[in-house]
Image (cartoon, rainbow, N blue to C red):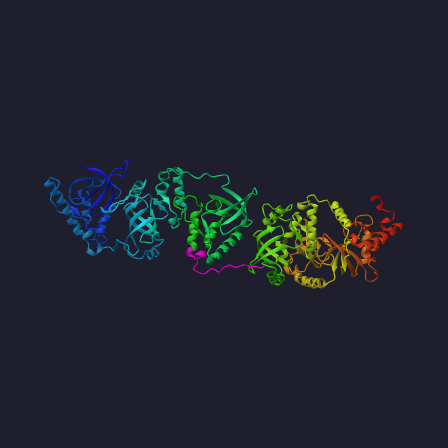
Amino acid sequence: MQHKATVKNVLSGDTVILRGKPRANGPPAERLLALSNVQAPRLGTKDREDEPFAFQAREYLRKLLVGKEITFIPEYTVSTNPPREYGSILLSTGESVAELGIQQGWLKVRENKSHSGSEEAYEQTLDRLQELEEEAQKTKAGQWQAREKGLRKVSHGFEQDARTFLNAYKGLSLDAIIEQVRDASTYRILLHLPDGSQQMMTLFLSGIKSPACKRDNVAADQPQGTSEPFGEEAKFFVESRLLQRGVKVILEGVSQSGGQNFIGSVRHPAGNIAELLLSNGMAKCVDWSITMATEGPARLRQAEKTAKENKLRIWRHFTAKEKTNDSEFDATVAKIINGDTFVVKTKLGVERKVQLASLKQAPRDVKEVGYQFEAREFLRKKLIGKQVRVVVDYHKPAQDGFEAKDCVTVTVGSSNISEQLVERGLASVIRHRKDDDNRSHCYDQLLLAEEKAQEGQKGIHSTKEQPIVRIVDASENAAKARQFLTFLKKSGKMGGVVDHVANGSRLFVWIPKENCRLSLVLSGIRAPRVGRTPTEKSEPFGQESLNFMSERCLQRDVEIEVENIDKTGAFVGNVFIGGDNIAMSLLKEGLASVHEFSANESRYATHFFNAERIGKADKKGVWKDYDPAAAEEAAAAQAQASDVVPEPRREYIDIVISEIISGSHFYIQVMNAEVRQLEDLMTELTKYQSGRPNEVLKPRVGDVLCAKFSEDDSWYRGKVRKVTAAGVDIVYIDYGNSEVVPYARLRSLPDRFKSLKPQAQEAVLSFVKSPEREADYGVESYERFREITGGKQLVANVDAREGGVLCLTLYDPSHSSSAEASLNLEMARDGLVLVTPKVRYARAYQTILKSLENASEEAKRERLGMFEYGDITATED
């Protein structure tokens, strides 16, 4: 009786396993069938060798039958253990497989007694087979060739070193036959090596794991195990496509246990079986081997994602994580906390603490503390102040004393920061549980980056000793600070990193070049205090000042200049970001005020007072309710109300007038060693600029440049006050004069020409005020003042400093005979200035003030200067 079946696999040149039609409740039935009246050479095992031509006979039958539907006729069964069924197999063309095998020389006739019941029919069949065998012998077909042609070199067990074998053949596309499917992702394969030998081995598909199946062909006393859900279906899926098919195998690794089993990919002309299993919900991705996949993990993950979305088979109960509105957003990195955690600020101004997903920072033991520091520095340089894209991968709830965290993947442009950290060996990748979907969405890239770091022995994977990072605290105490002060002052501007902002005017700065950390108080200013505890009240705008400095400075690269130290060991100096003094930014925003005593000691005093004036004029910050007139009256009233009459200042300086603004407003140069340094600097600057080509500059307000003065075509140091299309408004910082300079007459100024502080100091005549030059009698006042001061070296007493402006009483040494006989008095006597007795510092100078008032009264009586037509002050009163 004829039956239909599909050939599942071929055991030898004369024996096959047949498979019936698929069943609804499980895999199809199978039966073993041996060809009757013929026999093939026996295949070997690990205990015995092949008979000659056994493998070739098996291969002939495999290629002829596997996967094809055939007709078979069972004839008899032999009572062996297990029983063996014999019969005939016919191809779809009606040809007998036994006759074809005899004809090709791969089978021999096996004489036996008839089991069909008809002796005559049996004899006819035997005669036919013997005729075909004789023809094969004559033509030396198949096994009738020379014996040595039927031998093969095969190893049924793996006895060599797996790692050495892998290194020899890794990445090569090798021919192979799938001999057994243990489960859908584990196979026994026969590998054809380039040298012609063959190797049996166990292969796990890289990157995936299918449900387990109960084991076949095990001894009676060995457990078969149980099949997991969908395990048998997945196994049948693979067997029907790959069992005993010729494939290409790429070896990619060895198993986790380190035994003789290999990891690899299987390629078939129809596609990648791993992707097919994943997309049909018959396998899951596994992290430990997915990075070994030659084509990368992306396609495998996508296939798995498709099955999850469609809830196929093993994913039938899968529930995707819901995306929230804040699961992906743009932000600015505000602070780096450690090697995997930092603070970002969203566009709405909300700060969020985040941790890099699936990453673990370098261990905390002494040997590797340097890697923690290096990781933090890497993040700081890459991220601080930068706009980034944040994707929240999962939320880690609070546990074991640790706060809750958002675990994220952060990208800057197209660069994944986590991947860069791992690639440099500055962090390791967390091994999640296989059923844990709380992981980075770029997890596979992180695993690949870690492999790369391990191969290159980078960072924490290095065998070298990492130097321990020790940073000296230069502000530990005043004595320690004094040891550092001298060389820090001599060093001029130094690069540093702001580690911490205590308040608006106190920072902690790390100096990499000197490997020291210091407390730095901003020179010349005072910022409102910030409460140290939640219950301590901050001064108005103290928190705003702290926030401003944190946003601008925290963990930024800065330059510092050290001027002095205070009694606690903190250094006093200036901080520059992008060339701008940050103290001036605070003053302009009204988030600090000038500390007059320390400001007057600084070479930036004029800039500080000018910046504060801008803040006052704009009524920003602490100056939001500022009224100049009321403030002046309050200061004068306070001075008048004081019972103690202050002593007049006796601070005489030799000066020259470098620029006159009006009859009482001017710029001076103090005749000291710095003026002689200025002469040398101007000579060197002229030599430096001669012959240099023009530059294309984009000046900004506050920049110090080199400008060619229009009157003498010489180069001078100048500061930008205003930028227009026509030119740049420059004030020459060593003389006080200003002009609009064309762009072609501007050049950059090297730092070595900036070390000398500006020599022009703004000043006014004490106790008097002249008209502006544009006002009535302004020109006369200006001309008279120029007449009595021009080209002369004068002596000045600094009566006070008001907002960075010197209040001076001027004397001409050639004819001034007393403290009252000043040039201020001469201007008053000529009726070209008005006396201003209500200034804050007037109480200490009553004698001088009385003489000025008498001189002014005399000018009024004689109708001099601005009193030509009468007393102009009478209407003002």
Residue 571 drawn at (x, y percent): 62, 57
Residue 667 drawn at (x, y percent): 75, 56
Residue lying farthest front?
643
Q: Residue at x 49, y 45 (%)?
A: 403
Residue 24 drawn at (x, y percent): 28, 35
Q: Nearer the viewer, residue 660 or 848?
A: 848
Dominant SS in magenta = loop
* Residue 52 left/right relative to 720: left
* Residue 585 left/right relative to 403: right
Asked whether 467 falls inside the magenta stretch, the response is: yes
Whether residue 726 can be seen here: no
Quarter of the image where the N terminus is located: top left
Q: Residue at x 38, y 49 (%)?
A: 288
Asked whether 739 falls inside the magenta stretch, the response is: no
Q: Nearer the viewer, residue 499 or 71?
A: 499
Whether residue 680 can be seen here: yes
Q: Nearer the viewer, residue 567 or 264?
A: 567
Quarter of the image where the C terminus is located: top right
Residue 872 drawn at (x, y percent): 85, 46
| Stretch of the chain drawn in magenta | 454-474
* Residue 125 left/right relative to 370: left
Q: Residue at x 16, y 42 (%)?
A: 77
